Image (cartoon, rainbow, N blue to C red):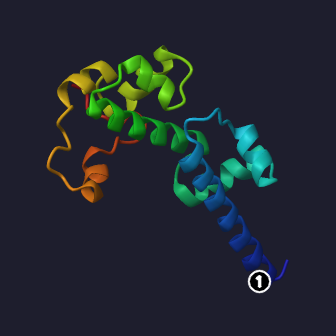
Amino acid sequence: MDGGRALAQRLRDIAMMRRVRDRIDREYAKPLNLDTLARGAHMSIGHLSRGFRRLYGESPYSYLMTRRIERAMTLLRRGDLSVTEVCFEVGFSSLGTFSTRFTELVGVPPSVYRRDHSQAAAGIPPCLSKQVTRPVKNREARAR
């Protein structure tokens, strides 16, 4: 493949990975898995996984989990839903999986986060709130 065609293919792959990421951002609460995402992007699971990781530094699954947990953090801070309601609202089908994943990313269980962080973003402009309250990546949360 010559340089021009290789570059054109790379740009098409980047555009497709952005569409996959945008779909995850929009549909995080729906049942999404690699097969569904790959079929929607008209590529193999392997090609999607490698390309997404190369472009964004994490797997599509990890990115999806981070989006779900970010949304869960927002809902838990609001305080009007139970942990179980939040779990299902953000797309998890198991409270145990949700609690485990939340604790891995945030460093505390969702019930503790809800209790201790209900006012975490109070007074912070929404444009900064997401940065201040963003979960850390897999297993990087401080032990508490």
Q: Nearer the viewer, residue 63 or 55?
A: 63
The amino acid type, in three-letter code, at marker 1 is Gly
Give the quadrant of residue 76.
top left
The reply to whether residue 109 is in sight is no
Q: Residue 107 at what x, y percent from top left?
A: 30, 29
Question: Which residue lies most toward the front here?
Answer: 80
Q: Is mark 1 on a helix, strand or loop?
A: helix
Q: Nearer the viewer, residue 20 or 137?
A: 20
Residue found 29% across the figure and 53% down from its top: 131
Residue found 27% across the figure and 33% down from its top: 77
Question: Which residue lies most toward the right here?
Answer: 1
Residue 34 lies left or right of residue 129; in this view the side is: right
Quarter of the N terminus within the rendering: bottom right
Q: Residue 3 at what x, y percent from top left?
A: 77, 83
Q: Residue 74 at what x, y percent from top left?
A: 33, 38
* 16 shown above or below 81: below
* 14 shown above or below 61: below
Q: Residue 130 at what x, y percent from top left?
A: 31, 50
The reply to whether residue 133 is in sight is yes
Quarter of the C terminus within the rendering: top left
Residue found 25% across the figure and 56% down from its top: 128
Residue found 64% across the figure and 32% down from its top: 31
Residue 90 lies left or right of residue 142; in this view the side is: right
* Residue where numbered disc 1 is placed: 3
Characterize the local packing of mark 1: few (<14), some (14-19) or many (20 or more) Cα atoms within 10 angstroms.
Answer: few
